[in-house]
Amino acid sequence: MLYYSTNKRSEPLTFREAAISGQAPDKGLYFPEFIPELSKHFLAELKAKTRAEIAFEVIKPYVGGTIPDEVLHTICEETVNFEFPLVQVNESLYSLELYHGPTLAFKDVGARFMSRCLGYFSRDNKRNVTILVATSGDTGSAVANGFLGVEGVDVVILYPSGKVSNIQELQLTTLGRNITALEVKGTFDDCQTMVKQAFADKELNRKLILTSANSINVARWLPQQFYYFYALQQWPYSQPPVVSVPSGNFGNICAGLLAFKSGLPVQHFIAACNSNDVFPVYLQSGVYNPKPSVSTYSNAMDVGNPSNFVRLTELFEGDLALMQQTVSSCSVSDEVTLETIREVFYNENYLLEPHGAVAYAALKQFMNENPGQRGIFLETAHPVKFNTIVEKCIGKVVDIPVSASHLAGLSKKSLIIEPGFQELKDFLMNK
Ligand SMILES: *Cc1c(COP(=O)(O)O)cnc(C)c1O
């Protein structure tokens, strides 16, 4: 299996090479040259398989022999060693809870898989690889946790001071070892600009092997397919579900669409967006018009130019009509998001957080327009990660789950820096 760049001006690479380089030199995204087809037998036996077996069989063709089977199997076992429960919320809607991993958000799966692949690929390296990430919260904690203690890899995280939730900050700043947290006195956009400058700086790149760990990277993007298989594994009906995915950079939904193209039965996909509505507008009009992001309560989806949009068009080979048959999209306001959290808590006795609430509201709207279906929405983070908003909606305190209770006793360790490239560069040059 080779990966070509969506800009078609860089050489095709193996999984190993694509995972190490992240983005293609021509600034395109790597895309598999073909989509493997799953056997009827595999799909019929889904319910009887373990999570690790499913992960292994789904990802093996994509890894294309660059990791030996025994190693890949262990990587899969470690990646998915927590639950992905499908919980019934009412008569026709189910929640796929993707927040039972170590940092309480769905990004754990991609980060755990990618870190173990890079750990394997860099086992004979003389120089450490440095992963540089800008985060608005969830990505940084998942990446830090996934890479903690991986030999040959250092992680440097930039986060905007005072703009991540308390629990997110503790997850970012208390790990130590090969993880360093830089607290930037600015916004998320400042952090992202600084990281981009670092990747473009010649002197820095002579000194360090810099890599990114966002969903542009195939090793983080592809394992997200697993969620959709675990959903179907627990689906109690013969009619396939409608699946609603809260979307920001569109990595998650693109992975779902890959699984679908491989043969996974899904009725229809919904890309649920907040007020950042570039994609819903595109589906309606055929015009893709990226714009600056606006901030919302579902801040992990505040993206004005989704990086995986090119993979979406690649999946449908630029055929808008075909995309419209498979995917719908809608934009959900902050007001409706809050109302949804409140209503679902008091009427259905189920607690959502803002990202899951956007997916729920979009699915509900689709069901009203297309009656007689059943569906699944993806709940991508634990409500405690967005407790200020959730508690405001329901007027109750959200309990911290046992898996995060240790954080309360830890003290934050971060290095405070000014926004702007120079201080970041000085730090990295002297590392
Ligand atoms: C990152 C994130 C999303 C958006 O996922 P994409 O793959 O970027 O579309 C949704 N919800 C939460 C909680 C996230 O952290």
Image: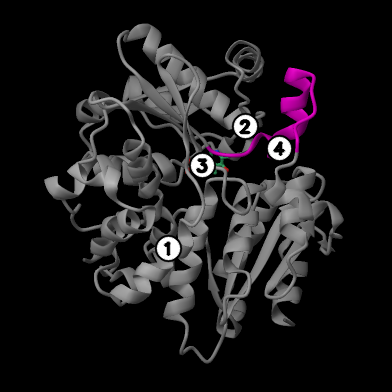
| Disc 2: residue Cβ within 8 A of ligand 1's nearest atom | yes
- Mark 3 neighbour density, 10 Å: few (under 14) some (14–19) many (20 or more): many
| Pair 1/3: label in front | 1
Q: What kind of residue is marked 4?
A: Val
Position of 11 compared to 303: left or right? left
Query: Mark 3 sits on what residue?
Result: 98
The answer to the question of whether label 3 and label 4 lie on touching residues, with beta carbons closer than 8 A, is no
Q: What kind of residue is marked 1?
A: Glu
Q: Where is residue 193 in the image (x, y as percent from the top left)?
A: 63, 55
- Mark 1 neighbour density, 10 Å: few (under 14) some (14–19) many (20 or more): some
Query: Mark 2 sits on what residue?
Result: 298
Prevailing secondary structure class for the magenta stretch in the rendered image: helix
Mark 3, secondary structure of its residue: loop
Distance in Å between CA atoms under marks 2 and 4: 13 Å
Instruction: Please give the name of the residue rendered at 35% of the width and 48% of the height, measured from the top-left corner.
Output: 225
Query: Mark 4 sits on what residue?
Result: 384
| In the foreground, 267 or 404 | 404
The answer to the question of whether label 2 and label 4 lie on touching residues, with beta carbons closer than 8 A, is no
- Going from the N terminus, do you reach mark 3 or mark 4 first? 3
Instruction: Please give the name of the residue rendered at 39% of the width and 32% of the height, measured from the top-left corner.
Output: 288
Q: Does the magenta stretch include residue 397?
A: yes
Residue range corresponding to the magenta coloring: 380-399
Mark 1, secondary structure of its residue: helix
Distance in Å between CA atoms under marks 1 and 3: 16 Å
Q: Single out the residue that lies furthest toward the front.
A: 48
Q: Specify whether residue 275 is in view.
A: no
Q: Specify whether residue 152 is in view.
A: yes
Position of 389 compared to 376: left or right? right
